Amino acid sequence: MKLDWQDIQARGARGVGISEDEALAVTALSDEADLVALFATADAIRLALKGNAVNTCGITNARSGRCPEKCNFCSQSAHFKTAAPSYTTKTADTIVAEAKQAAEYGVREFSIVMSGRAITARKDLDVLKDAFGRIRAETGVQTCASLGLMSREHLAELKAAGMQSMHHNLETARSYHDQIVESHTYDDEVETIKAAKDLGMYVCSGGIFGMGESWAQRVELGVDLRALDVDSVPVNFLNPRPGTPLADRHDLTPTDCLKIIALLRLLLPTKDIIVCGGRELNLGAEQINIFKAGANGVMLGNYLTTAGQAVSADWKMLEEQGMVVRAPPHRPHPPSVPHTIRAEGTDLAGLHGKPV
Ligand code: SF4
């Protein structure tokens, strides 16, 4: 299939994504001239719909390890012998302090992540409610959580307490999901996403790439995320963890990673495409090109069980690419970010510190 880049760009700028057939044709591109056209089109669509505003996220791993689920990429599963830390739920005080630190580093959205199939214990829900209320009152960053499979009732309770966004990855395509996640189903993931969408929450859902899936399955995942109308798509590239079944997988080249980002921008032109875990390992020096490939967001600081690069290096990258931080929905005071970076609509002072 011959791709009409001008038409794809014009449609994308109107918020219309490419067809599944076009997406499959994109995945087959390998000539340098074709890849240049792909990235230029994805970049133009990003600029048309998102400008140079960038979403910045930070996370805390508020409960780590001992997870009864079996997700073959995850070092926190109790099924595998790994070096991942293991601890019970942090206190609300600790989580709020981490959120404040992340706000100082300039994150727009702060997510509380807990290992496990689901959050059901009343004491955990109470910690989360306390933390959400205080983070909203004291930092102004957008509040998010990633808590496994969630019931509508628990989501509604957390939303009332101040949780604005819900993160829950599909992980991979439906046709590959049972090779990766052995303890719950793709439909379980979908139900959690639908519950949050029904409640009017901002839903962040994507996957991990480089787990052995085919290019057609990457398209399949993107098409499903579009059908679910998720609001943002976190793009993770596998950082293989010793001790897990995927410990020896190294499937992706930097160009593959950029192609995946561009593919998602073309499929989901209006959505936020956020590059998260595995960025440094899989992209190396090419990570500076994630925005030119269509991304408009990045996770700052450390990931759940792996270290990210220094926040100062991330800010340098944003600066070099001319990106500005998208202002949080309600921030009582300007964030501290580097003097050379201006958050949208704010005057800023200097950035201090190390990764979150
Ligand atoms: S991804 Fe989540 S549910 Fe799966 S094993 Fe890891 S912590 Fe458990």
Image (spheres, rainbow, N blue to C red):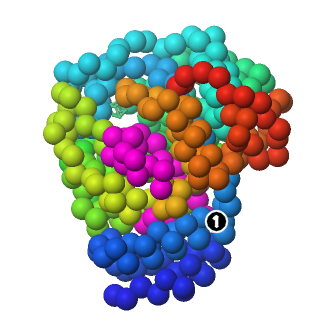
Residue drawn at the location 31% of the way across and 43% of the way down? 238
Q: Where is ligand 1, by quadrant?
A: top left
Quadrant holding the C terminus = top right
Is 270 within the magenta?
A: yes
Q: Most prominent secondary structure in the magenta stretch? A: helix
- Mark 1 — residue? 47
Quadrant holding the N terminus = bottom left
Image position, residue 190 (x, y; %): 44, 51
Residue drawn at the location 29% of the way across and 73% of the way down? 30
Does 15 appear above or below 279? below
Residue drawn at the location 65% of the way across and 76% of the way down? 14
Cβ of mark 1 under 8 A from ligand 1: no
Q: Which residues are magenta?
A: 262-289
Q: How many marks?
A: 1
Q: Is residue 47 left or right of residue 172?
A: right
Residue drawn at the location 78% of the way across and 24% of the way down? 137
Image position, residue 128 (x, y; %): 60, 22
| Amino acid bearing label 1 | Leu
Q: Is residue 107 left or right of residue 273?
A: right
Image position, residue 230 (x, y; %): 55, 55
